[in-house]
Structure formats: C-alpha cells, structure tokens
Amino acid sequence: MSKLYSYKPKKVLFIATRQIGDVLVTTPLISRARELWPDAEFHFLGYRGKLDMLKGNPDIAEIIETSDRPRLPEYLALFNRLFQRYDLAIVTQPSDRAYLYGLLAAFRRVGVLGGHPQGQTGIDNTDHKAERQNAWKKAICIHTINVDYFKQHVIVEKLRLLEVFYKNAQDLFSKQIVVTPPKEESLTPVIASQLLSPYVVVHPGPLTAYKRWPLSYWQILITWLVSQGWQVVLSASSAKQDLQLNQEMLSLLDESTRQKVIDTAGKLSIPQAASLMSGALLYVGVDTSITHLAAACNTKTIALFGPTPPTNFGPWPNGFIGTEPYVLRARTQTNGYVTILQGPGECVPCRKAGCDDHPNSLSECLDLLEPAQVITAIEQALSKA
C-alpha cells in the first residue's frame, strides 16, 4: 500500500473495545492524529463504563458507548449509527468485533493485529493460527501493526497505526509523547474534608490476582509512610474484590496508623481520581490502569510489576521522546518521574498469568519484591527535585 501523506479524512472513528487502561493509552495516538488532521472530527467507540478516561478530552467530539455483549436490538441501533459514516476507522484492539465495527463504520481502516499472548512463535503452530485469524483483517485494512508483547510499548504500537500517513515514520517519535488524563473533577465533600497535605496515594488492587503484592507487605509500607508524617489515601474501584482487599489491609494496621489512612474505595469517579492523583506527593500501585492514570497526571509514580513486561505496558513518563522508555528486566528502573520495580528471577517477566498461568495464581516475583526495595525507591524519588 502506498503512503497516504496527503490523505485528510473529515471524520475519524477510534475503536477501543477493552478496559479503561486500554482507552487511556490511545490518547497519544489521538493527539498525534489531531496534529495530522487539525480540521477532522474525531469520535470514539468503546464499551459502556470504560470510557471515563476520555472525559473532557479536547480532541474527541463524540463518545459512542456499546455493551461488551450487545443483543440484537443494540447491534441494529449501532449499525444505523455507524454505517459508512466515517472516512477512516482506527482499530486499536485486535479483536474480531473491533474490526467488524471498523468495517461497518468507515471506508478505510488501519488496525492492530494480535498474536501469541506470550509473544512467542513456532509453538503448536500458534503463529500459523494467528496468521490465519489475521488474514481477513489485513485484507480490509490499508495498514496494520503487529502486537509485540515484549519489545514494543503499547503506546508505540498505537502511534504506529499512523505510520502510513507520514513520509518519515520516525517523525512520530521525534518529539514529546504525552498521555492525556481526563479532565479533573472536584472530590466529594466528605473525602475533601478528610484530606491532609502531604498525602500519598496507594492502589493495591489489580484487575487479576496474579498482579497482587502481598497484604503483609502493604501493611509494612503503609506503616512506614505514616511514620514519615504523610497521610495515606487508599484507592480502589467499586469491585467487590477491591473493597474486600482494602478492608483486609486496614484490619492489619494498628489503630494509630489506621487513623491516618483514608479509604476511598469505590467512592471516586475516574475524573475525581485524576484530581486526587494530581495533588498527591507520590503514588504507589500495582500494574493496573490507575497506575497509568497517576503517571498521566505527572505524579511521581512507583509501579510494582510482576509477570507483565514494562517494555510493553510500563506507565508512560510524559514528555519522553522515543520508543523505548524501559528495559525488559531490571530490579529498579526510573524514567522521568516514573519508577518501575520488579522482583528477582530469570523468568521475570514471563507475561503469563502468574506462576500457575491462571487469573488467581500467585506470582513469586511479586512475593520476592520486598517492602525495603519499595521504600528505597520512594526515598530516591522524593530526593529528586
């Protein structure tokens, strides 16, 4: 396919049918697309309840929500709303459904292609299976980008969808790359009245258990944070397992420490969480979307990584120029105001679902990432201007 340097679509649809973190990491792509096409109208299609990361985004004119499992009436309504309304669809997820939406909506498409979840090939013919599954997606696109689960950062992956519209693809990465957080909203009066400065935000709950750090380690860390004279704010979603995790953590703290901890679990919207992050002295969290939000808010961020490669999904340090902010394996690595910590082991990162490769598995690398390593990282982060 020839390069489309002079192509100027009037209406563009971005498609991200996954979780809130997957939506947030599309914002650098949206910003670059705006630079390319300053007069185009941008819309965004994603799952209902997963699009709050885009609230107040100045480049998005319309947000289109759909169920993750639409029934026939919703499909028909979506068909009528989307059918050939766009000049270009940018498919940022490799799912079949995302591509079908792109095919329905636009005359032209670019998209991300998936592969083996561990980024390997040649095992049980998995690479050939992926090629077969991707064949029709390539056929309907003017340009595609393959996911590399170890060597290519997810933000770089999204930006490369615009390669075909550049004379020199490296121009995509020759200036600062910034993740745009949602527009901040005021905290609820109850939480705002309890908040003291300086405070540290702690987010212990990932979407899946294999990304968890041991509760006893959080107890040690929170006790140390309070001993430094800082208030601790616990962050979590309204999911049952997150609420329970925070309650279990609070039960481990002694009374004097617990009095200096605020539990905001389930009480904040994503824009309110952005406001909380922006005012924090520091953020400490596991590999989850809220950790990416903290980094997007330019808050000093300590991210605890286990099986996931930081080269693929480390929180992007805003303002970084280039394609590789992190190396694959390092006990401690810092880029800008973001520090990523990993546990020991030659298997780190495996990109499996924990040691037993299922959502409820333990991850030994996180069990071996001791609180002392996190405390040292905090001290070093705060010692820098």
Image (cartoon, helix red, strand yellow):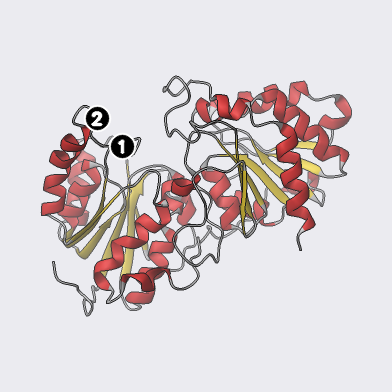
Q: Is residue 53 left or right of residue 70?
A: right
Q: Secondary structure at mark 1?
A: loop
Of 121 and 59, nearer the camera is 121
Instruction: Give the answer, above or below, for where 339 lies relative to 372.
Output: below
Instruction: Give the answer, above or below, for where 382 lies relative to 236.
Output: below
Marks 2/1: CA–CA distance: 7 Å
Q: Is residue 223 left or right of residue 139?
A: right
> Label 2 sits on what residue type?
Ile
Residue 154 seen in the figure: yes
* Residue 187 on image: x %, y %: 67, 50
* Residue 115 on image: x %, y %: 26, 40
Q: Is residue 385 left or right of residue 333?
A: right
* Residue 76 on image: x %, y %: 17, 44
Of 340 and 301, nearer the camera is 340
Q: Secondary structure at mark 2?
A: loop
Instruction: Give the answer, above or below, for where 357 lies relative to 176.
Output: above
Tell me which residue sits at (48%, 20%) in the image: 360
Q: Which mark is residue 176?
A: none
Tell me which residue sits at (32%, 78%) in the image: 39
**For the residues bearing labels 2 and 1, Cβ distance under 8 angstroms:** yes
Write down the quadrant of residue 384 in the picture.
bottom right
The residue identified by callout 1 is 120
> Label 1 sits on what residue type?
Gln
The residue identified by callout 2 is 123
Q: The C terminus appears in which quarter of the rendering?
A: bottom right
